[in-house]
């Protein structure tokens, strides 16, 4: 038995939210621990159900985002901390229970992400050819349990959504496979799939106006540089009234996004004037239509398959209120992708707020509660949530840092008030969790195991002149990690 006197924290989920929180916890403890009576030492065990870490960064973002490499390397530096112990391939609720964690850890922090789409909820949503963005993202990101093949035989496709995931999906559907392979870590099955993609026309439908879209400037700039793709817009969408311009100007990010959209408007005009070209002036063989103020109302089918999408024209006021006009249009398409939001994962034994789509927590402060809301909702001691698990599927990866600081502050405050300076777990042997998992035949993959997978991916990429090439088979990952 090797009991230790350090604080012991379990974090569920090794994506950005979990890794940032682990790092910030150790930093804040180092700064404030003595005055809070907690000491400055902690051991953080990070549990991840997938065989590899990084969650959303590896499996939720399009492979052609250049900034993702920097985020992944920053997360990796954090995991290389001797006070953080990685337990990949360990599923909470299946391999280890909440009670078993509470017995061994002073606090448990949920940083679980999202793997499901919010349902489309339109007539025709169940037709063959209607896809949720999450499953498509899993395919092109090589998610370990995702699809290995994707039907890309529709020549005309629609994408529904006014956020970054919609932009990712639309961009990958318009992508040139060779260009994508040269710049990213996509595996062979994704390269072959995109190479065989028949899509020639894409319609992106955004329910609100130019000033209310939720795109990041980076997403827009990536859309601008698609080889062989002509961007097509409706100039009327850009006739913004003074109130809308004033409202958009109040927020720096919104203002930058609107300015970038006006740049795209000019690009689209130049592409048309130059004879339907792409951004470099080369002939375009694919057309990408961007429709603002259009709300999809029905997916039309024939013989059980998608044949068109019906949309209703809307208007949007300066304050973002959308009004339907009763004017409808139909566009022939054979596939519809909806990116209207994710539904963060539930966690066994933890109440879920269905309305807001996140784990039940008190007033958004990250302290887990017994139920979603109402007078009966009581804070459950030693349980916390951060990232999408805390606030639902909104915000960029960077938002998880500010979340983490808030939650960590609350955790430290609570731990300082607890008996024994926060050391409340009965079993303080750091090897206890290893024995428990071993007794169940669970073989966790640690940081050294992940580094073996990473080294193999880099070596495979180097053979093709690429930085990295993803392994997608979970059994292969396990074999590499445990070698």
Image: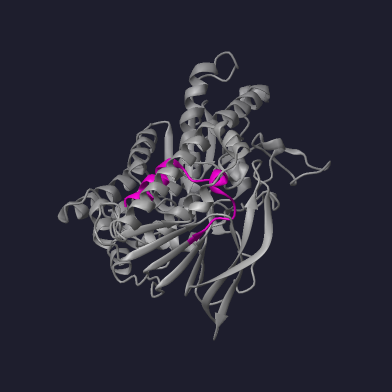
Q: Residue at x 51, y 28 (%)?
A: 25
Residue 287 seen from this side:
yes
Q: Nearer the viewer, residue 455 or 430?
A: 455
The answer to whether residue 125 is left or right of residue 149 is right
The answer to whether residue 480 is left or right of residue 352 is left
- Disc count in the image? 0
Residue 55 locus on image (x, y percent): 44, 48
Residue 424 locus on image (x, y percent): 63, 31
Q: Given the current orientation, which residue lies at the most extreme bottom position?
A: 303
Please determine whether, in this image, residue 285 is positioned above or below residue 451: below
Q: Is residue 328 magenta?
A: no
Please determine whether, in this image, residue 186 is positioned above or below residue 199: above
Residue 176 locus on image (x, y percent): 29, 61
Which quadrant holds residue 473? bottom left
Q: Nearer the viewer, residue 471 or 356?
A: 356
The answer to whether residue 123 is left or right of residue 331 is right
Q: Given the current orientation, which residue lies at the most extreme front position?
A: 273
Colour mapping used in the image:
one colour
Q: Residue at x 71, y 36 (%)?
A: 363
From which residue to which does the magenta span run? Answer: 204-225
Residue 141 seen from this side:
no
Q: Nearer the viewer, residue 171 or 114?
A: 171
Residue 388 locus on image (x, y percent): 57, 44
């Amino acid at each position: 038995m090797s009991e230790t006197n350090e604080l012991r924290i379990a974090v569920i989920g090794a994506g950005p939210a979990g890794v940032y929180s682990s790092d910030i916890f150790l930093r804040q403890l180092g700064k404030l621990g003595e005055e809070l009576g907690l000491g400055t030492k902690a051991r953080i065990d990070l549990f991840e159900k997938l065989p590899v870490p990084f969650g959303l960064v590896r499996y939720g973002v399009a492979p052609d985002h250049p900034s993702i490499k920097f985020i992944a390397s920053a997360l990796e530096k954090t995991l290389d901390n001797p006070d953080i112990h990685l337990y990949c391939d360990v599923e909470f609720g299946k391999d280890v229970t909440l009670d078993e964690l509470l017995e061994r850890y002073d606090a448990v922090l949920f940083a679980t992400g999202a793997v499901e789409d919010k349902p489309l909820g339109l007539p025709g949503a169940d037709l063959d050819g209607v896809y949720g963005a999450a499953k498509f993202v899993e395919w092109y990101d090589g998610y370990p349990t995702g699809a290995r093949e994707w039907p890309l035989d529709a020549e005309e496709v629609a994408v529904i959504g006014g956020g970054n995931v919609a932009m990712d999906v639309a961009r990958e559907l318009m992508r040139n496979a060779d260009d994508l392979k040269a710049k990213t870590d996509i595996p062979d099955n994704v390269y072959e799939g995109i190479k065989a993609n028949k899509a020639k026309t894409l319609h992106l439908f955004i329910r609100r106006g130019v000033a209310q879209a939720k795109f990041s400037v980076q997403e827009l700039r990536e859309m601008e540089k698609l080889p062989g793709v002509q961007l097509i817009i409706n100039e009327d969408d850009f006739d913004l009234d003074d109130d809308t311009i004033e409202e958009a100007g109040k927020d720096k990010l919104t203002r930058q996004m609107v300015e970038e959209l006006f740049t795209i408007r000019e690009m689209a005009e130049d592409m048309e004037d130059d004879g339907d070209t792409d951004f470099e002036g080369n002939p375009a063989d694919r057309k990408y239509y961007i429709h603002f103020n259009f709300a999809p109302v029905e997916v039309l089918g024939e013989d059980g398959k998608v044949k068109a999408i019906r949309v209703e024209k809307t208007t949007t006021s300066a304050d973002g209120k959308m009004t339907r006009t009763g004017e409808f249009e139909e566009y022939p398409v054979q596939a519809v992708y909806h990116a209207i939001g994710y539904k963060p994962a539930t966690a066994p034994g933890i109440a879920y707020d269905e309305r807001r789509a996140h784990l039940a927590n008190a007033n958004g402060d990250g302290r887990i509660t017994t139920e979603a809301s109402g007078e009966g909702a009581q804070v459950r001691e030693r349980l916390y949530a951060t990232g999408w698990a805390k606030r639902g599927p909104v915000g960029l990866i960077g938002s998880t840092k500010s979340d983490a600081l808030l939650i960590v502050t609350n955790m430290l405050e609570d731990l300082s008030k607890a008996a024994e300076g926060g050391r409340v777990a009965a079993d303080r042997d750091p090897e206890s969790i290893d024995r428990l998992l071993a007794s169940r035949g669970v073989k966790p993959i640690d940081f050294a195991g992940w580094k073996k997978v990473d080294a193999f991916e880099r070596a495979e990429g180097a053979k093709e002149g690429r930085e990295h090439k993803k392994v997608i088979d979970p059994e292969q990952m396990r074999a590499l990690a445990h070698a």
